[in-house]
Image (cartoon, rainbow, N blue to C red):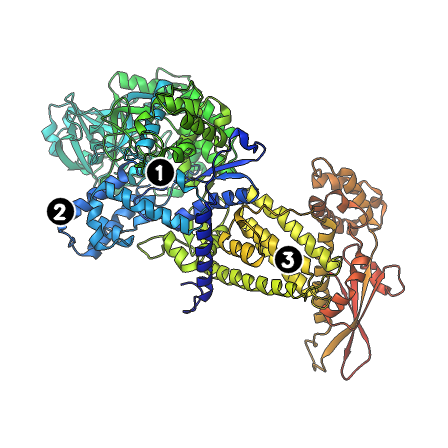
């Protein structure tokens, strides 16, 4: 709840100012912007075009959307404020499976449970959903540290653990009587986009809504644009039809891309080689007897076919569930059911999706089974038990190469060393004891058998020593590939990296191995089923093709990514991304122009739509659905027309397309493109954002049309916890605005964080923002009334406090502009609000007995503060700008404030004064404190003080400064390494000093301090005198110092003055010494307490 208790008057004031400001902007069409015509004479005015991935319309927008959106909003508002012609459009994504899947679920739930549905016990259903989510998480496997993987997919995070689609709709605030309408896909398109628009407007986003649209063929204008895009990509050879492995949803009967998934976003196919280990006929007994007379193979999935020469056994999970499956060629393979299902979609079984199972059995039935494994040096090896096999990864059958695998070596060693373990699983000695390591790969660092060596080095005791075994694998596997040399087989002497693909292909060719693929980890489709990997014959975008990849890398090289982590993620994605299945059999979207049985999938129709924003208003006239026909019928939008608009080709005739409209569209595109900024969550780097780079470099040969910058951010926590509907820790955008007001919410979003790490939205910050903003409004009103009444000082504003305050405003302006330019909005809030507020408060305090604040400076502060805060809190600032400051126009385009260059000396002087008062106050507290032991006595009071000032550095300090000044590079503003500087000090005249050792103890901190000071103030910090006149500052502010410290008398002198006394040796430039005269009511005798400034 906003604020505390039931008093929401302050929040309500902000909501009222919000209503007024948004009404003004709507009436004046403040954010509608067109490209200038050549005759407008605005060629010199900069433009800014920023955009945001259109949100998916299967629910209401929430704070997570608002956080990413706020980055673009603040940037756009800043550019509009400073005078750039600024375009911020917004659209709505409806393509793909999610809406269709959700609609189908509602229809199924109504059919199964009635309308309204009466479901089984909710707690049971939610417990099942929670257990399913945990199982998926457990199956995630090790994370790639270079690749972002959310703990929950977006879909899972949104729905929490609600077990039904009906419950998810209820959690979104949809009344029960309206939910049945959502069984129709088109209802989603009509329902959610207007609500999203409502909420983005309420947030105060400066959007040109004329350019808004929805995707899919429901919008014929956008549909024509996407068809042109794909025709163009096919024409230049970027789309091919081929059979490729793709993550596939058996329920949906089509590939399942990231946006079609409930979990497993970013997961791709993992390709293995299945090693066909032939079972000896004499072993087809017992549970395996029905297989007698057939060619039976244990199928083990491997990524390292080059090590097959070193096999000593085969691993089986004793209580694992296995099956014998007959392939289309009559061969029988033994594997787990999940692997067989995957393989059935890879053209290995007679019927797709239906692996022919001959029998099932437990793994124990395979223990002791003898097999002949291809490429193995040993003629016969045996199946042995291993308890750490995962049945949700690979086939459940695992090859064993103890020379190169630390896990295999320790498992085999355990069986050899533990008779009881052999007995437990019925393992005969002859299956284990005769088998020794068979070296097959030489690694320079580890010799011919790396696993035994590294296990000994790490002192691994058993196969259960998981942490050390993982470290052992980390040490050996990569080096085995990069540095290993084959020492067995027909590729003996070849580097592993050369031999590996050759051995793999040879095994495929001689039918001792076959290609197999499965998802890297569990993927669930939005329709509810687990996905497999299928060999699909469909249309693919040729991502990863060398020439295209090189152009994408060049585009990235010239882009601003704002954070190194983001750039590295892009580089990593470009490194692994390959062909992408871009067609689907059903869902919502645009038909493949040349093959209309397919739809274009949702991540592929959303890569260059930023270009469509530039012309959407001319085609759709502000109707997001494209149902209005303000200018032309969509059938007129041929590829020839789009080519003329976007590629600059010859214009079609007037009869084919209106020339005036065409010229306006060309002018809009050429003015706004390329876009200057795209803002997104970092999870889209692995697909959407990298796809955008690829598609721009393919469509536009002209590099000037390629994206200029991508700004990515982390996810948003809510009060230090993950947002989740199931826990109640969740806020829709509408709820947040109603609870706190748009400006307080925006303030909190700006304060939440600037990095690519997860940020944190804190309710307490929002409540504090309500208080701060409303108190500022009141103070501004009071001060403007005081100014009008002539009650504030109007003399020349040249006092120290005036100069300091003016300088603080100049500093805030410069720093805040730099932060806005770098999209560091939390820092902009700090310099442009918090720091400026502190400077104002200090000015009020210091000027209290100096005739008060100056009228002109007070008014300038209000204006500067308003303009600096306007991109973040525009509603409040619009009120201040128009109503309090009585300015014409809108604050949104008022111009960024200008100021003088920061006076570094004045900044240093002000800090010096503040620090001095703080330290003197501590000194007074210390010398007036009662004794720790004995009688306390009467209270002591410091009434007199002396400040001793050193005019310049002398002695060893002067020598050090001279060395620093000689070493400082004024161009790069850098120093050589500290050891080099210390070496110069040691070889200087100081080395002859008898006290040199003690001096050197003080040299290091002094040098470090002055180097840090030079990083801020430049070479002037290395002078023997400091950059401001200490004595002048102290004399000008002596009354303030006396008042702040309650001193009746204060003497200021140089170290050479007669009042300096023993303090002369303690003072250095910028660090004066001071002392006080302390008295008590009963004893007026003076006692001197000395305190050196720390």
Residue 713: mark in rendering? none
Q: Secondary structure at mark 1?
A: loop
How far apart, in angstroms, are the residues tagged by discs 2 and 1? 33 Å
Of the image marks 1 and 3, the number of the one nearer the N terminus: 1
Is 865 placed above or below 756 here?
below
Q: Is residue 310 left or right of residue 551?
A: left
Quarter of the figure with residue 968: top right
Distance from disc 2 to disc 3, alpha carbons, whole Å, reads 68 Å
Q: For the N terminus, which image quadrant?
A: bottom left
How packed mark 3 is, by other alpha carbons closer than 10 Å (few <14, some 14-19, many 20 or more), is some
Residue nearest the viewer, comparing 436 with 824: 824
- 3D distance between C-alphas at marks 1 and 3: 44 Å
Outermost residue to the right: 1058
Q: Where does the image place residue 228, in percent across and percent down from the top left? A: 35, 25
Residue 366 position within the rendered picture, expressed as x and y whole percent measured from the top left: 19, 34
Instruction: For label 2, count other residues whose C-alpha is less than 10 Å away and answer few (under 14), some (14-19) or many (20+).
Output: few
The disc at residue 859 is 3
- Mark 3: which secondary structure? helix
Task: Compare residues 517 and 901 and report the one nearer the observer.
Answer: 901
Q: Residues within 10 Å of mark 1 (few under 14, many from 20)?
A: many
Quadrant assignment, res 834: bottom right
**What residue did someone put label 1 on?**
213
Where is 523 relative to 326, above or below? Answer: below
Which secondary structure, mark 2? Answer: helix
Rendered view: 437 above or below 361: above
Can the viewer see residue 615 in this picture? yes
Q: Which residue, given by chain and number where applicable, does mark 2 sit on?
A: 111
- Asked whether disc 1 touches disc 3, contact meaning CB atoms under 8 Å apart, the reply is no
């Amino acid at each position: 709840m906003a604020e505390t208790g039931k008093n929401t008057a302050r929040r309500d004031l902000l909501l009222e100012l919000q209503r007024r400001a948004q009404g003004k902007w709507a009436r004046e069409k403040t954010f509608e912007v067109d490209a200038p015509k050549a005759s407008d004479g605005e060629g010199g005015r900069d433009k800014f075009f920023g955009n945001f991935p259109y949100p998916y319309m299967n629910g209401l927008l929430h704070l997570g959307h608002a956080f990413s959106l706020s980055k673009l909003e603040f940037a756009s508002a800043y550019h509009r404020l400073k005078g750039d012609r600024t375009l911020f459009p917004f659209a709505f994504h409806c393509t793909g499976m999610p809406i269709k899947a959700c609609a189908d679920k509602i229809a199924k739930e109504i059919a199964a449970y009635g309308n309204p549905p009466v479901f089984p016990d909710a707690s049971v259903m939610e417990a099942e959903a929670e257990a399913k989510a945990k199982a998926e998480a457990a199956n995630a496997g090790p994370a790639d540290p270079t690749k972002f993987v959310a703990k929950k997919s977006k879909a899972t995070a949104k729905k929490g653990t609600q077990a039904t689609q009906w419950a998810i709709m209820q959690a979104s605030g949809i009344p029960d009587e309206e939910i049945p309408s959502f069984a129709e896909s088109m209802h989603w398109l009509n329902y959610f986009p207007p609500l999203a628009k409502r909420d983005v407007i309420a947030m105060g986003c400066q959007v040109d809504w004329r350019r808004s649209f929805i995707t899919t063929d429901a919008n014929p204008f956008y549909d024509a644009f996407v068809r042109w895009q794909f025709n163009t990509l096919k024409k230049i050879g970027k789309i091919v039809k081929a059979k490729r492995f793709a993550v596939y949803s058996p329920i949906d009967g089509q590939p399942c891309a990231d946006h079609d998934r409930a979990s497993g976003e970013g997961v791709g196919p993992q390709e293995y080689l299945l090693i066909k280990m032939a079972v000896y006929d004499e072993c087809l007994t017992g549970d395996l007897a029905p297989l007698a007379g057939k060619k039976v193979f244990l199928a083990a999935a491997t990524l390292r076919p080059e090590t097959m020469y070193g096999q000593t056994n085969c691993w089986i999970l004793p209580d694992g569930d296995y099956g014998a499956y007959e392939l289309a060629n009559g061969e029988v393979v033994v594997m787990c059911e999940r692997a067989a299902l995957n393989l059935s979609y890879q053209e290995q079984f007679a019927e797709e999706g239906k692996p022919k199972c001959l029998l099932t059995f437990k793994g124990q039935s395979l223990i002791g089974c003898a097999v002949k494994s291809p490429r193995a040096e040993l003629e016969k090896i045996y199946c042995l038990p291993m308890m750490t096999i995962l049945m949700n990864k690979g086939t459940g059958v695992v090859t064993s190469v103890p020379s190169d695998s630390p896990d295999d070596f320790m498992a085999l060693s355990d069986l050899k060393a533990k008779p009881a373990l052999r007995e437990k699983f019925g393992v005969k000695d002859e299956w284990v004891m005769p088998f020794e390591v068979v070296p097959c790969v030489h690694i320079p660092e580890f010799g011919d058998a790396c696993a035994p060596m590294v296990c000994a080095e790490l002192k691994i005791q058993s196969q259960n020593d998981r942490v050390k075994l993982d470290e052992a694998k980390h040490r050996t596997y990569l080096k085995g590939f990069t540095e290993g040399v084959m020492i067995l087989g027909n590729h003996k002497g070849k580097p592993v990296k050369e031999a590996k693909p050759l051995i793999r292909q040879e095994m495929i060719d001689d039918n001792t191995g076959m290609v197999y693929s499965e998802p890297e980890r569990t993927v669930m489709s939005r329709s509810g089923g687990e996905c497999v990997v299928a060999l699909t014959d469909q249309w693919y975008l040729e991502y990863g093709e060398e020439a295209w990849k090189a152009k994408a890398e060049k585009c990235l090289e010239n882009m601003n990514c704002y954070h190194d982590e983001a750039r590295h993620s892009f580089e990593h994605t470009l490194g692994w991304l390959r062909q992408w299945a871009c067609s689907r059999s059903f869902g919502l979207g645009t038909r493949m122009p040349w093959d209309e049985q397919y739809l274009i999938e949702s991540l592929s129709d959303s890569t260059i739509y930023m270009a469509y924003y530039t012309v959407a208003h001319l085609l759709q006239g502000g109707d997001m659905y494209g149902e209005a026909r303000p200018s032309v019928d969509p059938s007129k939008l041929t590829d020839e027309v789009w080519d003329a608009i976007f590629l600059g080709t010859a214009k079609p005739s007037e009869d084919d397309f209106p020339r005036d409209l065409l010229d306006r569209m060309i002018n809009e595109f050429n003015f706004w493109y390329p876009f200057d900024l795209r803002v997104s969550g970092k999870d889209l780097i692995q697909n959407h954002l990298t796809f955008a780079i690829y598609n721009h470099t393919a469509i536009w040969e002209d590099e000037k049309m390629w994206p200029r910058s991508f700004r990515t951010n982390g996810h948003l926590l809510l009060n230090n916890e993950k947002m989740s509907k199931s826990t109640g820790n969740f806020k829709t955008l509408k709820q947040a605005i109603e609870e706190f007001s748009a400006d307080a919410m925006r303030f909190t979003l700006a304060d939440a964080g600037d990095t690519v790490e997860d940020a944190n939205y804190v309710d307490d910050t929002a409540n504090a923002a309500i208080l701060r903003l409303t108190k500022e409004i009141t103070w501004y009103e009071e001060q403007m009334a005081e100014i009008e009444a002539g009650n504030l000082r109007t003399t020349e504003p040249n006092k120290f406090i005036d100069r300091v305050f003016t300088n603080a405003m100049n500093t805030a302006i410069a720093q805040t502009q730099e932060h806005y330019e770098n999209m560091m909005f939390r820092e902009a809030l700090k310099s442009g609000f918090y720091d400026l507020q502190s400077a104002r408060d200090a000015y009020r305090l210091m000027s209290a007995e100096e005739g008060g604040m100056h009228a002109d400076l007070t008014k300038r502060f209000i204006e500067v503060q308003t303009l600096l805060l306007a991109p973040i809190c525009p509603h409040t600032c619009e009120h201040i700008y128009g109503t309090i400051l009585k300015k014409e126009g809108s604050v949104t385009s008022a111009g960024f404030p200008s100021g003088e260059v920061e006076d570094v000396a004045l900044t240093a002087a002000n800090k010096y004064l503040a620090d001095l008062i703080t330290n003197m106050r501590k000194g007074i507290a210390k010398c007036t404190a009662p004794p720790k032991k004995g009688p306390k006595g009467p209270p002591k009071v410091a009434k007199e003080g002396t400040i001793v000032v050193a005019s310049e550095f002398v002695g060893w300090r002067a020598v050090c400064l001279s060395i620093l000044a000689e070493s400082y590079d004024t161009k790069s503003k850098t120093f050589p390494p500290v050891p080099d500087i210390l070496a110069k000090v040691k070889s200087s005249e100081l080395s002859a000093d008898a006290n040199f050792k003690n001096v050197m103890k003080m040299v290091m901190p002094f040098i470090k301090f002055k180097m840090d000071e030079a990083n801020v103030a430049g070479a002037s910090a290395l002078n023997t005198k400091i950059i401001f006149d200490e004595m002048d500052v102290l004399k000008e502010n002596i009354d303030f110092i006396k008042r702040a410290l309650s001193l009746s008398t204060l003497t200021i002198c140089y170290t050479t003055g007669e009042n300096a006394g023993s303090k002369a040796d303690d003072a250095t430039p910028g660090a004066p010494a001071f002392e006080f005269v302390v008295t008590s009511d009963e004893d007026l005798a003076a006692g001197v307490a000395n305190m050196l400034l720390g």
